[in-house]
Image (cartoon, rainbow, N blue to C red):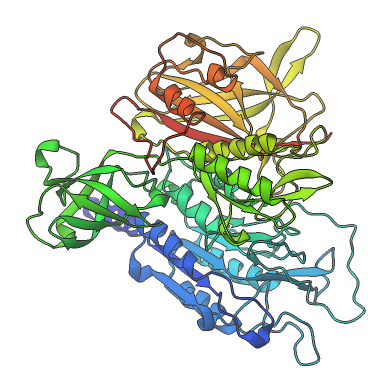
Amino acid sequence: MKNTIYIILFALLSFTVHAEKYAVIVAVGDYPEASGWADISSVNDVELIEGALLHQGFSKQNIMTIINEQGTRDGIINALNSIKSKLAAGDILVVHFSMHGQQVFDDNGDELDSLDESLVPHNAFAAYSDSYQGENHLRDDDLGNIIKGLRNQLGTTGQLFMILDSCHSGSSTRGSISRGGKGALVPPNWSENKEVKNSGSDMMENVSLSDAAAPFVIISGARAKEQNFEYEGYGSLSYAFAKAMNTLGTDFTYRQLFNKITAVMATIAPKQQPVIEGDIDYKLFKGEYVQQQPFYTVKKVVNAKSISINAGTIQLFNPGTTVHILPAGTSKFDEKLSLAHGEVSRTLFNESRVLLDKELPDRIAQNYIVFVDQLSYGDISLNVFIDETVENQVKSGVETFLKDKNIGQLTTTATDAQVIVNTQNGYYILQGVAGGDPLNVDDKNPGAESIEELNENLFNYAQGSYLRNLEMKNPTYEFSFRLVPVEYDESFEEVGEVLEFSKFTDDSGAFQISDDGTRAVLEVTNHSNKDLYFSIVEIYNDGKILPFMPNANCDFTDGERLIPRKSTQVITGCAYEFAPPYERIVLKAFASTSPINLTPILTKKTTRAVMNPLESFVKDTYTQTRGGGGSRSNDRQLKGYTTEFVYEIIKK
């Protein structure tokens, strides 16, 4: 009897251990000319997504890629059915779509606005005609039934995670590549129900499930009525997902992953709002994910003193980063085992070339692993396109300013830029390449009146973008935080009970707080084994950076911002009230083992105190005037951690 129990337990444990991770990546970008669809860079997304998943323990043989002409409607459905046949209860499945999206007429009466959302396969056409009525589009109804089958197959112990880097909006935007951008595919004389509003993706369908269906999460690149834009030849969501997956901390949920994605997209596509739906508070990959690691694998030994490694800008590598090469199988860094020391000479998204100080014993890549010595954080660099409506004198003034400050350069095309300068009502306007409202215009400021003011706007935007993107992820100093809504007694100015967080998130999963006097406080968590000091700034879409904790109204001392190791604190001594602008704002936290206060730097107040290295680092972003292409290196003193929380201020 005892042996029988052991055999059963062994079988159960073996089943749990051998649960598999699968993925399907669909990338359609080269559409037939007759389809009416413009080509997009979807295929570039494959390397980002595949690289991120391989790093998470997905095996190459379990990742199916469907590219261009393979991605017909039937081809996509057959691929998903094929992967379904391999799934067992408890497995994890990731499905990623990079392609055009479009709204199409509702063919079964289940949509309040009379429009289905759909993905655009390779053999789908953009316009309704006598010969085409949308039969090759992949509608949300179709997707809903496919999802149902996959969830039922995976069971309650499995997970299904879907990523949609497409959009369904009918508007178009100048100066960038959009995924979608066509009007709805509808019959003649069709009319839309315009009263219906939805801040979600509209891709979540209500379908009947078994009681044993798997949890399901879907992240979309944009809301139902928004455009989804590309960034430097990659889908903005694909880029943000890959970057977020390389900065995972402890106990990550899908909601926390989404917060990371939102923070990245606030910089690269500030007017585009990603959406998360489903079981978002489940642990990412059932908690079986790989946290950011201090070592990487070698892709190729180019020659005895040069290697190519599987890490690039997505993994926070920049030229100037230094590394040690150790024998494969080394579990912990030991400088005595170092075979060579090297410096990164150039980087791509997922790859870097490293020049070594000595020759390696052989040219077999699998024999080596790479440990980071010192990271280089790069310099502020802003690509600016000047519209033809701007005078040559102003263009020349901007070019000189960028060169003198060493913070960027002008581009000859809008698609190569991060920001566009044009004129509006006699003022100089900054416009994101993904369109949307001007970045330097609000109720009080109609834009820049002079070259000097325009240059200041450009500097603020460049610096804000740099700090938003800045990642310091030493696991030794891991730290996280969020805003939590609270009851507040105005008469006694006292904080009451913490309110339910989920009631302050919208359909897209974003934390929202209104300007009606609702208060929130900070909840901070120190995940590390060291006591940590922290400081938080807020970064707006136009790049403006203001102190958040401490600030003039919440002037907490260093000691009051010290969080003991392995603890969480709700800081009730400072209750925040919110006012316009009505936009998504990034809160960026810096944590360190020594006191840190960024307020004097941001308010440009002088201080005689000795600065924390992190403070000095941020201060340097205000005075970048070096010539050449130097990089901000992480010297031995610069030890810390950065993390973000994104929230949105809405009207009452």
Say whether residue 558 is left or right of residue 505: left
* Residue at 79% over, 34% down: 445
User: Where is the C terminus found, in terms of image quarters?
Assistant: top right
Between 431 and 361, the one nearer to me in the picture: 431
When the figure is inspected, residue 472 is found, relative to residue 240, above or below; the finding is above
Outermost residue on the bottom side: it is 131
Q: Position of residue 294 (x, y in %)?
A: 29, 42
Outermost residue on the left side: it is 361
Where residue 98 sits, quadrant-wise, is bottom right
* Residue at 56% over, 11% down: 556
Residue 280 seen anywhere in this rendered image of the structure: no
Where residue 650 sits, quadrant-wise, is top right
When the figure is inspected, residue 16 is found, relative to residue 319, above or below; the finding is below
Q: Position of residue 364 (x, y in %)?
A: 14, 62
* Residue at 63% over, 63% down: 209
Query: How many badges with numbers are in the image?
Result: 0
Between 430 and 530, the one nearer to me in the picture: 430
Q: Position of residue 122 (x, y in %)?
A: 59, 81
Between 586 and 607, the one nearer to me in the picture: 607
Say whether residue 148 is left or right of residue 185: left
Q: Position of residue 644 (x, y in %)?
A: 54, 35
Residue 622 seen anywhere in this rendered image of the structure: yes
